[in-house]
Image (spheres, rainbow, N blue to C red):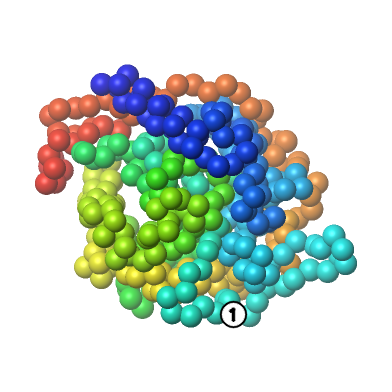
Amino acid sequence: MRAGLGQALRGLLLLSARSCSCSGAGRRRRLGQPLPRCSWLSTMAQCSTEQRGRPHSPEYRLYFKNAEGKYISPFHDIPLFAGSKEDKEVPAKRSKTNGSETGLPKKPPPSRAGETVVFNMVVEVPRWSNAKMEIATKEPLNPIKQDIKRGKLRYVANIFPHKGYIWNYGALPQTWEDPHHKDKDTGCCGDNDPIDVCEIGTKVHYPGEIIQVKVLGVMALIDEGETDWKIIAINVDDPEAQKIHDIDDVKKHKPGYLEATAEWFRLYKVPDDKPENQFAFNGEFKDKDFAVGIIKSTHEYWKALLHKKADRGAIECMNILVHDSPFRCSEEDARLIVQSAPPPASGDSVSAEVDVCNTSGLYTVAGCNFQQSCITK
């Protein structure tokens, strides 16, 4: 079964790579290889990645570079709002023509009800994979790494009938769910991370890829007593993006997807001997306008974080592009940080536990549970 699942996943990834409209389409991309630069990305979002360490190991890191080859933080230096108009509303890099800089706005860019706002998304985890990759918020330059729990690399479980993550999973840059702010709707404080995104398009994306997404809705997960917003979005270049504009369109054109998403988040920690997660709003998905409001509020919390107007705790705020931020560093400082990381190395194979199936009901690391109604112990 493990060999079959692995072969099928490799085939799907290859098919997705061949369907990409970017330069270099049709060639498989190895983990850590620079990403093709798509014409629809804004200058600030044309990023490549640089691997450090060995994939599937605790020391593995994926660092980011901008279009000029400068090391940047995907958390802080990639703009939240995509496109030339929106990029003017967020911290900008120094202009080559006049040397001026654009500061932070006093309030987020306005939007009318129902208006489509496009955001940059940092992809952390490809659909159908199990390794829990994430932006390292507590490390300088915030590279992507694999999460570790109890001294072991973390893989999410396969909850029948799902294989790994059921969407491309990632985060919106320049957002922060403030752990000291109690949300008026959920009654819980933020989870101290950038806001999470579930991208539901047809393509499989890669760790470190920057894509432009339009927001469709949001659900409020209560994860171990913390508010953990989950944005539902779709890549603007996806073939289905032309017919999916709001959360009701997801229900119409992708029946069962939202129900599967809620089930996935409710159960995914149970194999780790944790209780089922809960949801605010009785598990209801809120619409696009509500979601955009949440994103803009987390953008304001991020701005306070980057200007020492919020308690950052262990969050690493080093950046090279945020105007007037006391955490701004030089290009040389950023380069030295990357050079101090372990050199790139060939990766080990993924743990066999990722695809091992336990027909008795529960997987130890990333297996299936054949009880569709619930996970029992």
Viewer-side residue, 371 vs 233: 233
Viewer-side residue, 13 vs 335: 13
Q: Is residue 341 above or below residue 281?
A: above
Give residue 356's position: percent from left, percent from top: 27, 25
Q: Is residue 140 left or right of residue 273?
A: right
Q: Is residue 79 left or right of residue 206?
A: right
Crowding at label 1, few (<14), some or many (≥20) Cα neighbours within 10 Å?
few
Which amino acid, mark 1? Lys
Give the residue displayed 53% in from the left and 23% down from the top.
Answer: 347
Give the residue displayed 28% in from the left and 53% down from the top.
Answer: 254
Q: Is residue 366 above or below residue 201?
A: above
The answer to whether residue 225 of the structure is visible from this angle is: no
Give the residue displayed 36% in from the left and 78% down from the top.
Answer: 184
Q: Which residue is mark 1?
A: 107
Give residue 363's position: percent from left, percent from top: 23, 32
Give the residue displayed 65% in from the left and 76% down from the top.
Answer: 105
Outermost residue toward the right in this view: 98
